[in-house]
Image (cartoon, rainbow, N blue to C red):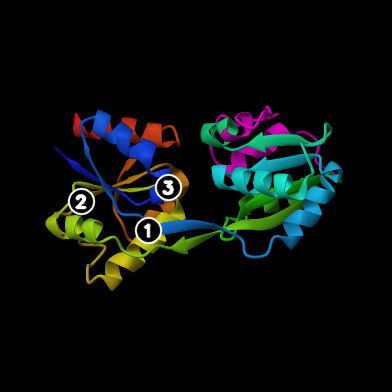
Amino acid sequence: MQRVLITRPRSQAGSFAQALEAAGFEAIFFPVIEICPASDMSELDQALSRLSRYDWVIFTSVNGVQVVWERLMTLGLGNIPAGTRLAAIGPKTAQAIRQLGVEPAFVPEEYVAEAILPGLGELAGRWVLLPRAEIARKALPEAICQAGGIAHEIAVYQTLPAQPDPSGLAALQAGVDVVTFTSPSTVHNFLTLAERAGFDPLDLPGRPQVACIGPITAEAARQAGLNVAIVADSYTTEGLVAALRKWANR
């Protein structure tokens, strides 16, 4: 049975691990990041109290959805104003919005930030709220500004390095078959944790394959010197499992 290392946060890795095991792999947890709400919510609170000024709120992750709804409930502000439309990047983010009783107005077919711009319509002079990670890429707000829109980007959660998992370190030492990455931050923090533990992350025991959830994560891995062998066609964990099955059956 091929051993697959999961680097995403433990709280978000359960369904991925189950899907891997159902596909015949052994899932090994080695979380390299933790997700924490931002320590200062004052800017988000101000934006939410004036939410009707925004034409769009764009969510790029489930984490952003959860933080915003928790703040809405905490502030007693109720639901999203009727004139404010929500956009979601990726089916998991869209599902998280739907579970809260709201239908996203737009979900792009390609699950990357750049793909969402064509679906937003005329942006000149329009306000767009972007509740995102502290280290989110700047491609989306820059594209909104180039289209004449006003991008209000707020860091609502942090991606922090996790403490190394002893069982995961032991699995690395014994050798795994695949290391999976689901975001650029998992790439960077994995390299840091591996080096601190005494591994050469570019020459791990057993020479595992590198598998990435999509092209942006794959590019981050390549820039870090990793040889990416597997990239999902559909940029979801389900797509990553499908890509791993295809690779394993070759």
User: Residue at horizontal 30%, vertical 54%?
Assistant: 30
Eye-nearest disc, 2 or 3: 3
Disc number placed over residue 208 in the picture, else none: 2
Disc number placed over residue 11 in the picture, else none: 3
Q: Main secondary structure of the magenta part?
A: loop
Point out residue 207 in the picture as x, y percentages from the top left corner.
17, 54
Between 92 and 148, the one nearer to me in the picture: 92
- 243 lies above or below 139: above
User: Residue at horizontal 52%, vertical 34%?
Assistant: 92
* Label whose residue precedes the other's in the sequence (2 or 3): 3
Point out residue 182 in the picture as x, y percentages from the top left corner.
41, 47
Give the amino acid type for the residue marked by disc 3 in the picture: Ser
Q: Is residue 58 magenta?
A: no
Residue 150 seen from this side: no
Point out residue 148 in the picture as x, y percentages from the top left corner.
81, 47
Disc number placed over residue 202 in the picture, else none: none
Give the amino acid type for the residue marked by disc 1 in the picture: Val
Give the amino acid type for the residue marked by disc 2 in the picture: Pro
Eye-nearest disc, 1 or 3: 3
Q: Helix or strand or loop: what does disc 2 sit on? A: loop
Q: Which residues are magenta?
A: 96-124
